[in-house]
Image (cartoon, helix red, strand yellow):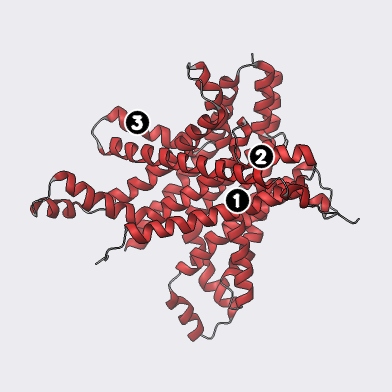
Amino acid sequence: MAVQLDFGVVLERWPELVRGTAATIGLALAGMALALVIGIAGVAVLRGKNRIGHAVVRAFVEVIRNTPFLVQIFFIFFALPLAGVRLNPTVTAIVALGLNGGAYAIEIIRGGVEAIPTGQTEAGLALGLRPSEVFRFIILKPALRSIYPSLVSQFIMLTLTTSIATSISAYELTSVAQRIDGDTFRTFEVYFTITVIYLLVSWGMMAMFAAVSRRAFAYPTR
Amino acid sequence: MIGPQELAFLGRGLMWTLALTAIGFTGGIVFGFLVALARVSPLKWLRWIAAGWIAVFQGTPLLMQLFVVYFGLPLLGFSPPAWGAVAVALTAHASAFLGEIWRGAIQAVPGGQTEAAHALGLGYRARMRDVILPQALRLSLPATIGFLVQLLKGTSLAAIVGFIELTRAGQIVSNQTFKPLLVFGLIGLIYFLLCWPLSRLGRRMELRLAAATAR
């Protein structure tokens, strides 16, 4: 059986592919920002003294990490309107991505903060640094540097997860592909093309994070 | 409401979720082992192929991998049933991730072990089988179980291709009963009951391993 592949009809829809790619990157960056906020807030609660807060954060982390993202996004999609919150699918997707990534970020950041020896904090205070300076320079920055690789691979994961947002009809690359597929019936060609685009996006993200790391953490380890 | 009929339907979906996970994980173990060996092979071209395989599967969404295999296999002249295509995609996906986990574990075995095996005159097979792999296996167990949880959750994406596993069954029941929160809450609970014990097992193994290697 001779198979005729026709990428032409897919590639001539390039303006839509570009817009979809931009939407995917936007979705990913917004999700990462929300995940980082949730991650830092969650760790702050875990380091605090509120027992109920501990239990809530722990339960949140376990539930999110042990259920599929697809089920989470459906649940949020149907739960928000019942709670009186009306969001468009794209914002709903960002909320779902942020909550999911946030649970993983809590685990990652907690590990980094716990690894800072208390002697360092005490030394900082003894040298006359203010507590806020101790937190910023002695706890947060070294902690972020040590967890940076894990956080980056989690964020790359989050970027790839944005494709699932198509299940609630959010606008991103996969939903664009489904529309092109519906018009052209070139199913394999469409999905192969956007798979390549996803690969380029995740490589681009990795390069970006490596550049950020070179600038932000460029000081001697010893 | 959700009656016995709906529950039976969800039960059949659950069976498919478990079957897909089992097939993907078993296939992933077999091919992941080959990927890991290729990744640490003395032959440069073999290392490159394995590295490329891993980079592609780690750099693209699982959903796209499912789509490309699902619609690509027929173009290659194969016409497997839907579950077969999904199983092939999950196996390929698992082989890349497990291969990378085991590559790390093999390289985490101290280099002195390889040198000692060399000094004892062991060849490649004996060195791998009797010296390196048993130690690597122990190091890799927590991450391997972590990936099993990922894979189990990942089978839910077969729902988007239209295959009726647990999540797709939930979607259908939700559309019939108009009780999305109840249905997806129940589906989430089932996944949680499957994944949580595995996650805990993995974490316990990790702690025990950390304690053992700290000395």
Structural distance between the alpha carbons of marks 3 and 1 = 37 Å
Instruction: Confirm or deny contact between disc 1 and disc 2 (CB under 8 A).
Output: no
Q: Position of residue B192 (x, y in %)?
A: 52, 34
Q: Which residue carries the number 1 mark?
A: A198
Label 2 in the same subunit as label 3: yes
Q: Which residue carries the number 2 mark?
A: A176
Mark 1, secondary structure of its residue = helix
Q: Position of residue B175 (x, y in %)?
A: 67, 20
Residue sitting at 62 percent across and 53 percent down?
B94
Q: Nearer the viewer, residue A146 or B15?
A: A146
Task: Please state, as top left, top right, bottom left or bottom right, where the C terminus of chain A lies in the image.
Answer: bottom left
Which class describes the residues within 10 Å of circle 2: few (<14), some (14-19), or many (20+)?
A: many
Residue sitting at 77 percent across and 48 percent down?
A9
Image height check: is A164 above or below B101?
A: above
Image height check: is B74 above or below A213?
A: above
Mark 2, secondary structure of its residue = helix
Task: Judge left or right: residue A164 versus residue B163.
Answer: left
Q: What amino acid is labelled 1 in the image?
A: Tyr
Q: Quadrant of residue A98?
A: top left
Q: Which residue carries the number 3 mark?
A: A55
Label 3 in the same subunit as label 1: yes
One can see residue B87 in this view = no
Task: Judge left or right: residue A3 versus residue B193.
Answer: right
Q: Residue furthest right?
A: A1
Structural distance between the alpha carbons of marks 1 and 2 = 13 Å
Residue sitting at 63 percent across and 73 percent down?
B46
In terms of sequence position, does the residue under pointer 1 or pointer 2 come before the other?
2
One can see residue A217 in this view = yes
The circle drawn on residue B141 is: none
